[in-house]
Amino acid sequence: MPLVINHNLMAMNASRNFTTAFDSLAKSTNRLSSGLRINTSADDAAGLAISELMRAEISALNQGVRNARDAQSMLQTADGALQVIDEKLIRMKELAEQAATGTYNSAQRSIMNNEFVLMRSEITRIANAVKFNGVYLLNGTLSGSDANPYRSGLKIHFGPTNSAAEDYYFIRIGDSRATALGIGTLDIASQSTAQQALTAISDAIVSKDEIRATIGAYINRLTNTVSQLAIQAENLQAAESRIRDVDVAIEMTEFVNNQIKSQAAIAMLAQANSLPQMALTLIGG
């Protein structure tokens, strides 16, 4: 290579190598400080696109878990109210049994009937009053009939898309008002009506138990749904991490390598900048 003073090609070469190494060092520093292998689209355009879709799905799945748990809370609210209704039906059965025997007179049965009617009215009041976040639970609103706005029941959405086979299902809760249970007009004012009430109340208890059993089955199903969603989100998070997160051990090796290259390039740049001074020796000579 000729000795020239207009262009220091060695210094230019050392400077270019230093810039390359320093850029790589800056990238390694960025990755190590952020914990991410992909910080911008320039780092890995395809990987960024895939990981962003995964992150959106993970967020949706996590919200789906919260949706399912909210549904469980709603069903537990309904089950708690039905437990109170159960107590009222048991008391009505007890009163009907008492009034059905011949050892009481009409006045005494009238007193029993007053409590019986109040229990019957209380069942309807509870069914009409119980709601969760503004949604009535036991008055037939969620029974799935075509005559109400929730014709298919209450839709519980937990998946990231809108497929009926994968992402949601409907919850239906039967009507628990006294009329729906078949006891809306019962009384025990006479021995004969008290005897008739015994069978009707037994049927009402069975109907109520069917509603509670359905609620229990929904709660168990939602528990399984929550478990499956959590596993799905966890696995998807692991896949997203492998794409986006930095491997600290590998990146630290790259960082040290780029650091050494940068230091070497600076040293060689200093040496290259001193070479043109050799020409001054020849000129001075």
Image (cartoon, rainbow, N blue to C red):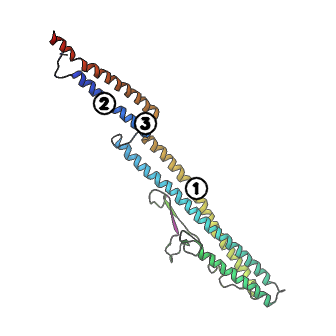
**Quadrant of residue 187 within the rendered picture:** bottom right
The residue that disc 2 covers is 20
The residue that disc 1 covers is 224
Amino acid marked by disc 1:
Asn
Of the numbered discs 3 and 1, the one sitting upstream in the chain is 3
Q: Are marks 2 and 3 in contact (CB under 8 Å)?
A: no
Query: Between residues 98 and 60, which one lies in front from this camera angle?
Result: 60
Can you give x and y, in whole percent of width and height, for residue 78 in the image?
Answer: 61, 68
The residue that disc 3 covers is 32
Which residue is at 38% across, 25% downward? 260
Question: Considering only vertical position in the picture, is 124 above or below 215?
Answer: below
Can you give x and y, in whole percent of width and height, for residue 89 in the image?
Answer: 70, 76
Query: Between residues 16 and 69, which one lies in front from this camera angle?
Result: 16
Question: Considering only vertical position in the picture, is 195 above or below 242?
Answer: below
- Span of residues in magenta: 152-158
In space, the residues marked 2 and 1 are separated at their CA atoms by: 54 Å
Of the numbered discs 2 and 3, the one sitting upstream in the chain is 2
In space, the residues marked 3 and 1 are separated at their CA atoms by: 39 Å
Which residue is at 29% across, 26% downward? 17
- Image depth: mark 2 or mark 1 in front: 2
Q: Are marks 3 and 1 in contact (CB under 8 Å)?
A: no
Left or right: residue 39 versus residue 210 is left
Which residue is at 27% across, 24% downward? 14
Left or right: residue 33 versus residue 205 is left
Tell me the quarter of the image containing the N terminus: top left
- Image depth: mark 3 or mark 1 in front: 3
Which residue is at 67% across, 73% downward? 85
**Quadrant of residue 267 within the rendered picture:** top left
Label 3 element class: helix
Can you give x and y, in whole percent of width and height, for residue 46 in the image?
Answer: 36, 43
Question: Considering only vertical position in the picture, is 137 above or below 19?
Answer: below
Of the numbered discs 2 and 1, the one sitting upstream in the chain is 2
